[in-house]
Image: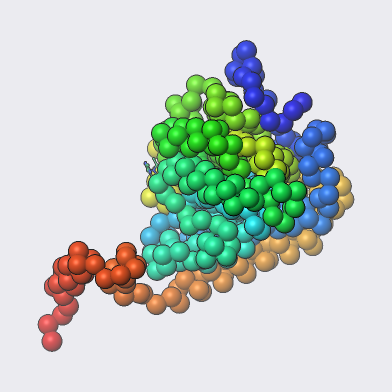
Amino acid sequence: MTVFRTSIPQAPQEEPTLRLLEADGTRHPHEELDAAIADVTAEQMRGFYRDMVMIRAADLEATNLQRQGQLGLWASALGQEGAQIGAGHACRPHDYLVPTYREHGIAWARGIEPWRLLEMFRGVSHLGWDPKALKTHPYMIVLGSQVPQGVGYAMGIKRDGLVDTGDPDKDTAVLTLFGDGASSEGEVSEGFTWAASFQTPTVFFTQNNQWAISVPTSVQTRVPLAQRSRGWGIPSARVDGNDVLGVLAATRIAMDAARSGGGPRFIEAVTYRMAAHTTSDDATRYRPSEEEESWRQKDPIKRLGAHLDSLDEIDDDFVKSCEAEGHDLAMELHHHIHALPDPDPREMFEYVYAEPHPLIEEERAQFEAFQAQFEEDE
Ligand SMILES: Cc1ncc(C[n+]2csc(CCOP(=O)(O)OP(=O)(O)O)c2C)c(N)n1
Ligand SMILES: [Mg+2]
C-alpha cells in the first residue's frame, strides 16, 4: 500500500491509518514504511523511548509550575510525544521547522532545552533559542500562520538551489506544524495553493489531537483531514500519531520527497491531547473522561516499551533509569524557574523596533506613569 496518496476513496471514511506499532506493541510489516526506517537500531529506539519519558516529565513539571504561579500558562503536549519525537527525528539538522505552541517534543528533538520553553511561558524571555542556529522557528500561537511561513521559507530554499542537488548534506526541506483546528484557517488553504503551485519542499504535519480547545475535529472537517490536501494535488497520508516508528517512517519519506524536488506532502498524525487545551482550560466541561481513558490505552510510551520488550531490548533497569532522569530533569526545571529574577517590565519596549520610535517612547512613558501609581510613598 503506498504511503502517500493522491486520490480520495469512494467512501472517504475508508482512509487507512498507517501504523507499524499496534497499541499493545505488536509490530506490523509495511514495505515502504519499513524501508524508510531499516537503519533504525534498538539503541535508537531506546533513545526515542527515553526522549518521550523526558519530555513527559518536563511537561508534567511545567504544569505543576504553572499551578504554583511560576508560569503564566502552559500548553501541555501530554499524549502527543510519539508524533513529535517521530517527526522531529525525521528531520536533519539543516532542515527548517516551523512549530506551533505545543511542540515540546519537536523542540527536544532539535536540541532545545525545556527550560528555554518554560522561560517563554513565564514571560521572561522573548524566545529562548537562536532560530537560525537551531533551524527552528519561534513558537507561534497565531493558528495557521505556520503554513504560509513554512511555504515561503521553502520557496527561498528552492531559489537558493538547496533542493534536488543529490547531496544529502545540502538538500533541505521545511517541516511545518499545525493543529486540526488550525486546518480551518484560510492561511492553510492559501499556503497549500502556493506550495502546490511552486512545488515547494514543505512537509505539512498536522497533529490531529481530536480537539481545538472545546471543538472536536468532526466540526473542522467532514472527511478525514489527510484528504484535504489532495484537492491541491498534494499527496498525503494518515498515520497513527501514537506510533513513533510509523510517524518517523512516514515523515522521513515525506521529507526525502520534498528535499529531492518531489514537492510538498501532508501528514495527518492521529493522536490525542491527554491534558486540557492549556492550564487555563477545564476539559472536563466538554469531553467525557471515558474518551481520555480509551486514549490512555493507546499511549505512545507504553506502546514502544511493549515493542522493545517483545524484542527483549528493554529491561527494568533501563525503564527505571529513564524515569530517574526524567525526575532529575523535573527538579532541575523546578529550581531553575524558581531562581529566575523578575525582569524589568519596561524591557518589553526594547525589542519592538531596532531603532527608537516615538510611539514606543510615548507608550513607555505612559507605562512608567502607570507603574509609578503603585510605588509606595517615601
Ligand atoms: C488565528 C487564531 N485564532 C484563534 C486563536 C485562539 N486559539 C488558540 S489555540 C486554539 C485552538 C487550536 O486548536 P488546534 O489547531 O487543533 O491545535 P491544538 O491546540 O489542539 O494543538 C484557538 C482557537 C489563535 N491563537 N489564533
Ligand atoms: Mg487540536
Identify the residue at image location x=55%, y=33%.
196
Q: Is residue 365 above or below residue 62?
A: below
Closest to the observer, 88 or 361: 361
Give the residue furthest to the right. 312
Q: On the picture, is 131 further left or further right than 312?
A: left
Direction from residue 265 to residue 124 in the image, left or right: left
Q: How is the image coloured?
A: rainbow
Q: Is residue 62 visible?
A: yes
Residue displayed at 39% across by 77% down? 341
- Tell me which residue sits at (45%, 73%) in the image: 338
Q: Nearer the viewer, residue 116 or 284?
A: 116
Q: Is residue 301 left or right of residue 150?
A: right
Residue 23 at x, y percent in the picture: 71, 37
In the picture, the quarter occupied by the C terminus is bottom left
State the image quarter where residue 237 is shown: top right
Q: Position of residue 209 (x, y in %)?
A: 54, 38
Seen at 36% across and 75% down, the residue is 342
Can residue 303 be seen in the rendering of this structure? no
Mark count: 0
The answer to whether 45 is drawn above or below residue 205 in the figure is below
Residue 255: percent from left, percent from top: 67, 44
Q: Position of residue 25 (x, y in %)?
A: 77, 40
**Looking at this view, is 5 or 161 the one in front?**
161
The single residue placed furthest to the bottom in the displayed view is 378
In the rendered structure, the answer to whether residue 86 lies left or right of residue 36 reads left
Position of the N terminus by quadrant? top right
